[in-house]
Amino acid sequence: MRTRWREVSSPTLARLGGAAACLAGVSYGAWGYLDNPDTPEILLGTVVPVLRLTTPALFLGGLVGLYSRLKGGGSPLLARAGLLVGLLGTVLGVVRGVDRWATPPYLVFHHWLPLQLAGLTMVGVATLLTEDAPPLLGALVLASVTLGWVSVLTDVAFPGVLVAMRPVHVAFAALFCMSAIVWGWALFRRPRSLTRPPT
C-alpha cells in the first residue's frame, strides 16, 4: 500500500541531487573509459584519481536528492537505511580513491559500488511505496540499479562475481551510466512533491 506525502520535500536539494546523479553517470563512464593501460600517463596520473573521488561522492549526492524527494512519505525506515548504506559506500569509495590509506583489514567487503547500488535499491523501492511521488522516478531508479547490478556481478575484479564476462560488464556499465543520467534528469526536472494533509 502506497503511503501519502505528509510534507513538502526540499525542491532545491532534490534538484541538486538530480544534477549530481547526472554528473555521477558521466563521471563513472569517464572513469571506466580512461582507467586502462592504453590511456596516456598524464591522464592516468591526473584525471583518473579525481574521478575516483568524485564518482562515489556524486552518487551519494544523487541518493541524498532522491531521499529528500521522499521526505515525509513512503517507508521512512527503508529510505533511511538506503541513505546510510549509500553513505558507507561513498566513504569506502573515497578512502580507496585517495589511495594514501590501505583499506582497513576489518572491512573485507571494501567495494563501494555494490553498497551504493544497495542504497539506491532501497530508496527506489521507497519511492514506489510513496503516493503522489511519480512512479516513473522509482521505476527509473530501480531499472538503473538493475543494470548496475548486472555490470558488477559480471566484473572479474569483483570478488562476488557470478559470471566473469567482460563484454557484458562493459555494456551494462555503459547502460548504467546512461540510466543514472536519465533518472537524475527526471529528479532535476520534477523536484517537488505534492502536499497532502495527514490522515
Image: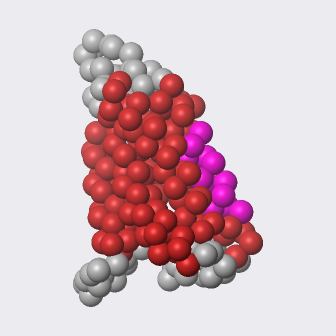
Give yes or no for residue 12 being in the magenta stretch.
no
Residue at 58% over, 60% down: 30
Residue 20 position by quadrant: top left
Give yes or no for residue 175 being in the magenta stretch.
yes
Viewer-proximal residue, 2 or 41? 41
Residue at 31% over, 50% down: 83
Region rendered in magenta: 171-182
Viewer-proximal residue, 97 or 146? 97
Residue 113 horizontal/vertical position (percent):
45, 65
Residue at 54% over, 31% down: 186
Q: In which quarter of the image is the C terminus?
A: top left
Residue 115 horizontal/vertical position (percent):
40, 63
Residue 144 horizontal/vertical position (percent):
58, 49
Q: In which quarter of the image is the N terminus?
A: top left
Residue 184 horizontal/vertical position (percent):
51, 39
Image: 99 above or below 49: below
The rendered magenta stretch, by its main secondary structure, is classed as: helix
Residue farthest to the right? 167
Asked whether, in this view, residue 33 is left or right of residue 198, the answer is right
Asked whether residue 89 is in view, the answer is no
Q: How is the image coloured?
A: secondary structure
